[in-house]
Image (tube, helix red, strand yellow):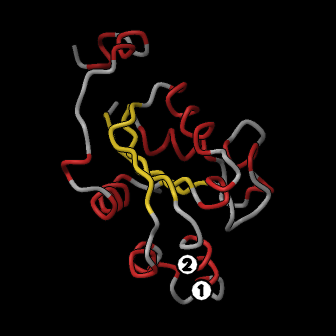
Amino acid sequence: MAIERTLIIVKPDAVNRGLAGKIISRFEEKGLKIVGLKMAWLTKDVLAEHYAHLKGKPFFPGLVEFMSSSPVVLGVLEGRNAVEVVRLMCGVTDANKAAAGTIRGDFSMSTSCNVIHASDSLDTANKEIARFFRPDELFNYDLNSLKYLYAPDELGR
């Protein structure tokens, strides 16, 4: 099992509702390590790059407007199969269809204002992390509780 890094964005709706801490704590409770964390106000240029794959969609202008309406919290999480684990924890994009117990299922009722973004693949995660974080903003450190999360053979020891 590979140790991976992935990006999350706690969206403006969650920040404005005071949910950032609750959302981030779920990832920590799961055993993922925070290796980067900051608050930022995203520009329309950065958002146009980030959402370039959606540029032709009718909802694109509203999405960019929403994502630039307030600061967001950006995070880089690290752990075993982090991309897949984080996506499962977030739930499906349409929060009305997200299962109870997922972040979107518990905190949202919208498709676009769905409280969180998470990278959809390892390749995307690497690009998104580089877009939002400089290398000196990411930290390598030992998570003291790591020995309680995995068996020694799962850590390659």
Query: Which quarter of the picture shows residue 126?
Result: bottom left
Is residue 88 placed above or below 93 in the rendered structure? above
- Amino acid type at circle 1 is Pro
What residue sits right under mark 2 in the picture? 64
Is residue 78 placed above or below 136 in the rendered structure? above
- In three-dimensional space, the C-alpha distance between marks 1 and 2, rounded to whole angstroms, equals 5 Å
- Look at 52% across and 62% down and name the residue there: 71
What residue sits right under mark 1 in the picture? 61
How many neighbours does mark 2 have within 10 angstroms: few (below 14), some (14-19), or many (20 or more)?
A: many
Is residue 141 placed above or below 42 in the rendered structure? above
Q: Is residue 145 left or right of residue 112?
A: left
- Look at 19% across and 48% down and name the residue there: 136
Depth order, front residue of 18/7:
18
The image position of residue 151, as x and y in percent, is 37, 11
Q: Where, quadrant-wise, is the N terminus in this rendering?
A: top left
Q: Where, quadrant-wise, is the C terminus in this rendering?
A: top left
